[in-house]
Image: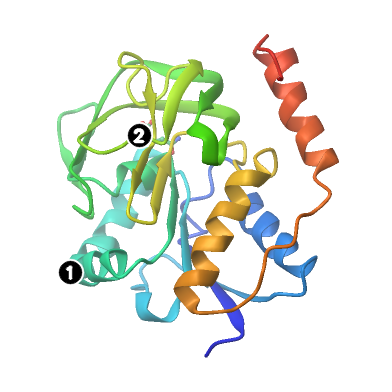
Amino acid sequence: MPTKLRIAHLYPDLLNLYADKGNIRVLVQRCRWRGIETEVIPVPSGEEPRLEQYHLVLLGGGSDREQELVAKTLGKNKLEWRQAVHAGLPVLAVCGGYQLLGEYYQLPDGRKVAGLELLDLVTKADGPRLIGNIAIDAGPELGTIVGFENHGGRTRHGHEPLGTVLKGHGNNGRDGKEGVRYQNVIGTYIHGPLLPKNPRLADHMLQLALDYAGIRATLAPLDDAFEMAAHHAFLSRRLDLPTG
Ligand code: GLN
């Protein structure tokens, strides 16, 4: 039985457009506060991930150019990805990383960047860019999720969304849905980074990872007053939404 939670950060040299590293820091710190050991494994560009060794995988956002570079390595082991996800590997993918989970991302010039084909999901670039603060209702388990979005891609998929847009654009600016949930995979356009202001989502990912790892540790409640003050300030001051 492992005792350490192994968190892989995929391609931090290319996919770290919106301080996505902050998500890793939040996960590590929330474990540290509870006496749970973690190990972060940065996987540099060009290297294939060793999925069987991780308990949680994070993929961040990147520019179109960086996404194309990452796609070249990612595409090499689609089968391993499929097997790992079906075995329950938790994956958190943000923005460009989210788009890479699907069939393809169609660039503004019409070329297609192949995705991992893990999800029945396609993204097509279009204008104008969908930029701004966003809040979604992610249901009773995850509550409200807040952050910032900036993407040209319009995503459509045949899965459960992560949430319903309260304010902002979401997957495509049209259908009122944001992100995706499939097995233990969560994809979203929300960054800034995502987890510091959304501690419930951070703990949700950690619980999935602990269960997947077979580590028997309970996520004792933390004093999230500071995190929730940021969350509520975002809702009320930036989005003019009620905090209740
Ligand atoms: N290719 C993405 C887009 O739609 C990049 C998004 C991102 O990671 N900011 O713009």
**Between 121 and 87, the one nearer to me in the picture:** 87
Q: Report crowding for label 2: few under 14, some 14 to 19, many 20 or more residues within 10 A (C-alpha).
A: many
Q: CA distance from mark 2 to mark 1?
A: 24 Å
Where, quadrant-wise, is the C terminus in this rendering? top right
204, above or below 217, in the image: above
163, above or below 44, in the image: above
Q: Which residue is mark 2?
A: 161
- At which x and y percent is residue 56? 48, 66
* Mark 2 vs 1, N-terminal side: 1
* Helix, strand or loop for disc 2: loop
- At which x and y percent is residue 156? 24, 29
Q: Is residue 82 left or right of residue 206?
A: left
For badge 2, the amino acid type reads Pro
* Quarter of the render that holds ligand 1: top left
Can see residue 8? no
181, above or below 5, in the image: above
- Identified at 77% across, 31% down, the residue is 230
Q: Is residue 61 left or right of residue 185?
A: right
Tell me the number on the disc at residue 79.
1
- Identified at 80% across, 45% down, the residue is 224
- Identified at 20% across, 35% down, the residue is 158
